[in-house]
């Protein structure tokens, strides 16, 4: 089955990885074994989950036996891994000890090569910087010329746009004057109509106001020598008069409102 082949491949991979480990081989082996165990466990669970598709099929009875078979294979691989681990650790340790001198020699050679190449790296850096400076020197006149050209074009555009902007400002001022001239007759008409309505209201209200003032003067003159009984009688007489004035004022307001609504 695919699960068995996958598990064996993981087991062999653990063994083959041991041959290339260095001084920290035991810790690396432990990490690889833990990862392999997690991978095999996930593969087993995925296979068991896939067996759920056998439900409600003629092969439903095989589900339990296949699941148990996968569990047995997983346990057997775990046991094999436990048996192989001591040998793997011994082989890795032996390889690490046997290659210690070689690894030290390689490290020394790399360090010596780095020290030997350092002057050449400095020389290479110097050559690159020299070339970059040459490129910059070569391009600098063109860059300056391009910047000067752009500045000249912007200045020319500004000079070209100045008359246009001045003309536009003049047009705006002229348009404002024309708008004001067109608006003034409307404003004047509204003002004239409002003055007429106010004069009409004044002329309409003047007789009532004068009459009311005269009645107030008479009432005040009479109130100079009246007693409490006469004041009560006067209040009773003035109340209908106040109501009459109120009604007349409301009537005038209605006339004014109707007049403005028609216009």
Image (tube, rainbow, N blue to C red):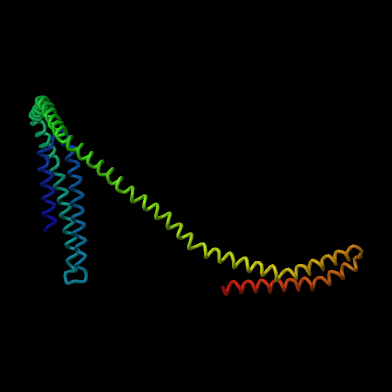
In the shown orientation, is residue 250 left or right of residue 159?
right
Depth check: give the residue in front, 200 or 256.
200
The quadrant of the rendering that contains the N terminus is bottom left
Q: Which quadrant of the view contains residue 19?
A: top left
Give the camera-side residue of 114 and 227.
227
Camera-side residue of 208 and 91 = 208
Answer above or below: position of 192 versus 167. below
Q: Is residue 131 left or right of residue 55?
A: left
- Horizontal placement of 145 versus 160: left or right? left
Q: Position of residue 257 (x, y in %)?
A: 62, 72
How far from the left and from the top, in percent, is residue 68?
18, 59
- Residue 57 occupies quadrant: bottom left
**What residue do we see at 46% from left, 57% from top?**
177
How many numbered tags mark residues here? 0
* Picture coordinates of residue 167, whole percent (x, y): 36, 52
Image spot of residue 79 (x, y percent): 16, 48
Question: Residue 136 falls in which quadrant of the image?
Answer: top left
Task: Identify which residue, 243 or 184, lies in the foreground.
Answer: 184
For the C terminus, the image quarter is bottom right
């Amino acid at each position: 089955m695919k699960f068995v082949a996958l598990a064996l491949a993981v087991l062999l991979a653990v063994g083959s990885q041991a041959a290339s480990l260095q001084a920290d081989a035991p810790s690396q082996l432990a990490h690889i074994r833990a990862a392999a165990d997690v991978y095999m466990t996930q593969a087993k669970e995925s296979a068991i989950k896939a067996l759920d598709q056998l439900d409600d099929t003629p092969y439903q009875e095989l589900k339990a036996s296949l699941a148990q078979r996968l569990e047995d294979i997983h346990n057997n691989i775990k046991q094999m891994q436990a048996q192989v681990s001591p040998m793997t650790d011994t082989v890795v340790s032996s390889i690490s000890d046997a290659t210690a001198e070689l690894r030290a020699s390689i490290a020394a050679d790399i360090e010596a090569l780095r020290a030997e190449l350092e002057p050449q790296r400095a020389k290479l850096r110097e050559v690159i910087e020299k070339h970059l400076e040459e490129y910059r020197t070569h391009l600098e006149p063109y860059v300056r010329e391009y910047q000067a050209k752009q500045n000249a074009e912007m200045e020319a555009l500004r000079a070209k746009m100045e008359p246009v902007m001045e003309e536009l400002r003049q047009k705006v001022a002229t348009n404002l004057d024309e708008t004001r001239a067109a608006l003034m007759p409307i404003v004047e008409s509204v003002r004239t109509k409002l003055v007429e309505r106010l004069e009409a209201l004044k002329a309409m209200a003047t007789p009532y106001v004068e009459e009311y003032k005269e009645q107030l003067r008479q009432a005040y003159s009479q109130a100079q020598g009246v007693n409490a009984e006469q004041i009560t009688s006067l209040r009773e007489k003035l109340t209908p008069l106040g109501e009459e004035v109120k009604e007349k004022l409301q009537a005038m307001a209605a006339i004014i409102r109707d007049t403005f609504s028609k216009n």
